[in-house]
Image: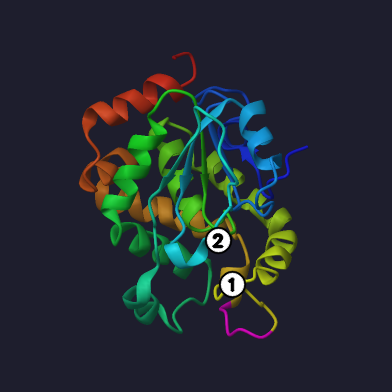
Amino acid sequence: MSTLINFRDAAAAADPGAVHARPGVLFRSAQPYDGPSAAPQKTLAENGITTVIDLRGPDECLDGDWGRPEPGVEIVRTPLDTGFEISQRWAGELRDAADLGAFYLDMAQSSPQALAVAVRAAARPGGVLIHCAAGKDRTGLMTALLLSLLGVPDQGVVEDYTRTAEALPAIFARLAERPHAQALNTETMDIPEVILQAPAGAIAEFLRLVAERFGDAEGFLTHCGVEPETLQAFRAKAEAGRG
């Protein structure tokens, strides 16, 4: 069993028949909590993961979060940060799942370079793991875009996203224990209730807005500066029946 909370093969969860996406290529999780322990590295090795995409901001990270990665494993840090301006724009506005989905798009649009770096890393050979802190919001939107790029239907993307709800109690408990300024106390902090959930409507609204404004995930990622050859490379390794 993995020591990473909220860890799963996103392609297998969203597309269990491997109709669109190859299993064993695209994984997701919350951040590691084992410090210098070799346990997270064992999970990477067992699943053929050679690239870890860390979407957290610098103030969320602790020294030794990934211990000492094994040779052949690279940690790519590309912060997809909510930022002060975005937080201010959305203060008091996150009331329901649709608001959360719109927030995801705002966050993604505000970090186009970070998204482009993440996609380039995901296109590298070998398995890739995407994570942020909880493995829900930033990880959710990034995973949704990549799954959509492979042709996974929206319903499958939604089913993968909502599986995070099962892990949220454990995630929040561990976040509250972080010896860090970004430790999360869901009982004392003023956090919109929807942020503490993984509602299907959030990622469904995100996908709807992407399609409405950019045509599809490819259109949005191209808008963010991802090169056609990068998109082709990711599909070549991650589409079912290829690679």
As measured in the structure, the alpha-carbon distance from the residue carrying label 2 to the one carrying label 1 is 8 Å
Q: Percent x, y for residue 219?
A: 25, 42
Residue 139 lies, with reference to residue 8, above or below; the image says below
As rendered, which of 68 and 125 lies closer to the eye?
68
Q: Amino acid at mark 2?
A: Leu
Answer left or right for 196 relative to 104: right
Residue 215 visible somewhere in the drawing = no
As rendered, which of 130 and 74 lies closer to the eye?
74
Question: Is residue 69 shown in magenta?
Answer: no
Residue drawn at (29%, 44%) of the image: 116
Residue drawn at (71%, 41%) of the image: 39
Answer left or right for 90 relative to 22: left
Instruction: State yes or no: discs 2 and 1 in contact (Cβ < 8 Å).
Output: yes
In what element is the residue under mark 2? loop
Image: magenta residue range: 188-192
Q: Residues within 10 Å of mark 2 (few under 14, many from 20)?
A: few
Residue drawn at (35%, 57%) of the image: 108
Answer left or right for 89 relative to 55: left
Residue 156 visible somewhere in the drawing = yes
For the C terminus, which image quadrant?
Answer: top left
Q: Percent x, y for residue 129?
A: 53, 39
Identify the main secondary structure in magenta.
loop
Q: Amino acid at mark 1?
A: His
As rendered, which of 37 and 211 lies closer to the eye?
37
Instruction: Check disc 1 and report the residue beneath it.
Output: 180
Q: Percent x, y for residue 107?
A: 36, 63
Task: Identify the mark at residue 62; answer none if there is no mark.
Answer: 2
For the N terminus, which image quadrant?
Answer: top right
